[in-house]
């Protein structure tokens, strides 16, 4: 496939997504679908949903797709799907980009389905390429964000810090939510508790708030393993969650293995919900 064709595929993908959004706002436009939209939809079908979501969320890094390969900044590439059948735990510990979209992020307010942990699966190769492969690398892109009398560290990469600022700005209009907003941490280079995978906090894209009003699956289900059945619990208000999600953050309370204090900048997960 030539570079020109590849660029056209990417352009058609974005055109189709934009047209779809316009039709949702104005249903009458559905009757006016022209040849351009038909062509865009044809090419969109050639690009997996997860790839389209990544391209929309991280345009400075994910530039295209060809032969099951993500085309990255600087002419690099990485497999979208490594072709391996994986268990639930393997999708968390050794994720390729496709694995990140193998779970359902359900915003309906229902309790998460068994093992539905959309967002807990992160492709470390991709995330380290974007945010930094070492603590020192990540720190170079951190900035301080004003957070209700505190300053929290967040990465500037992909507009994450700007998005957290937007969350804070909107929350200033909701004094009833202030008891839930005390931060217990944002950036911290570390592994996930009990696992060998990097925490989202390592990349400066996650913040924990309202710990005293939060629930964590292991606190409520001590001794349980990743694949055991567990009891769900949540005390976080839905309005707080909706504000974070509006600005590109997923919520750990949407996970079967819930972590209700946890909000993480993952616009690709939310994009996949909307496409």
Image (cartoon, rainbow, N blue to C red):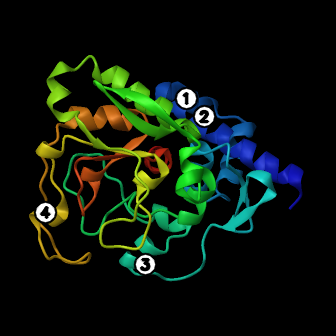
Q: Residue at x 43, y 64 (%)?
A: 121
Closer to viewer: mark 3 or mark 4: 4
Identify the residue under disc 2: 18
| Residue 219 - label | 4
Mark 1 packing: few (<14 Cα in 10 Å), some, or many (20+)?
some
Closer to viewer: mark 3 or mark 2: 3
* Residue 203 left/right relative to 227: right
Q: Position of residue 173 (x, y in %)?
A: 26, 16
Cα separation between marks 3 and 4: 23 Å
Closer to viewer: mark 4 or mark 2: 4
Mark 3 packing: few (<14 Cα in 10 Å), some, or many (20+)?
few
Identify the residue under disc 1: 22
Q: Earlier in the sequence, mark 3 or mark 1?
A: 1
Q: Earlier in the sequence, mark 3 or mark 4?
A: 3
Secondary structure under the numbered disc 1 in the rendered image: helix
Q: Position of residue 11 (x, y in %)?
A: 74, 42
Identify the residue under disc 3: 90
Label 1 near label 4: C-beta < 8 Å? Answer: no
């Amino acid at each position: 496939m030539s570079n020109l064709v590849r660029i056209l595929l990417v352009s058609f993908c974005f055109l189709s997504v934009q047209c779809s959004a316009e039709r949702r706002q104005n249903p009458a436009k559905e009757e006016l679908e022209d040849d351009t939209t038909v062509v865009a939809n044809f090419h969109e079908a050639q690009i997996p949903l997860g790839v389209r979501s990544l391209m929309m969320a991280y345009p400075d890094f994910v530039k295209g797709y060809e032969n099951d390969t993500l085309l990255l900044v600087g002419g690099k590439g990485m497999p979208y799907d490594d072709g391996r059948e994986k268990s639930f735990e393997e999708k968390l510990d050794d994720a390729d980009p496709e694995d990140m979209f193998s779970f359902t992020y359900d915003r309906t307010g229902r309790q998460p389905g068994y093992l539905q942990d959309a967002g807990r699966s992160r492709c470390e190769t991709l995330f380290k390429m974007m945010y930094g492969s070492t603590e020192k690398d990540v720190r170079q892109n951190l900035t301080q964000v004003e957070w209700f009398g505190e300053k929290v560290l967040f990465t500037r990469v992909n507009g994450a810090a700007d998005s957290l600022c937007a969350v804070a700005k909107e929350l200033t209009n909701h004094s009833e939510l202030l008891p839930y907003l005390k931060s217990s941490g944002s950036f911290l280079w570390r592994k996930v508790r009990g696992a060998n995978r990097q925490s989202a906090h390592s990349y400066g894209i996650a913040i924990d708030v309202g710990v005293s009003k939060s629930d964590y699956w292991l606190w409520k289900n001590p001794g349980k393993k990743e694949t055991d059945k567990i009891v769900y619990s949540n005390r976080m208000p839905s309005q707080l969650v909706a504000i974070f999600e509006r600005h590109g953050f997923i919520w750990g309370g949407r996970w079967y293995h819930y972590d209700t204090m946890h909000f993480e900048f993952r616009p690709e997960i939310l994009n996949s919900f909307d496409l």
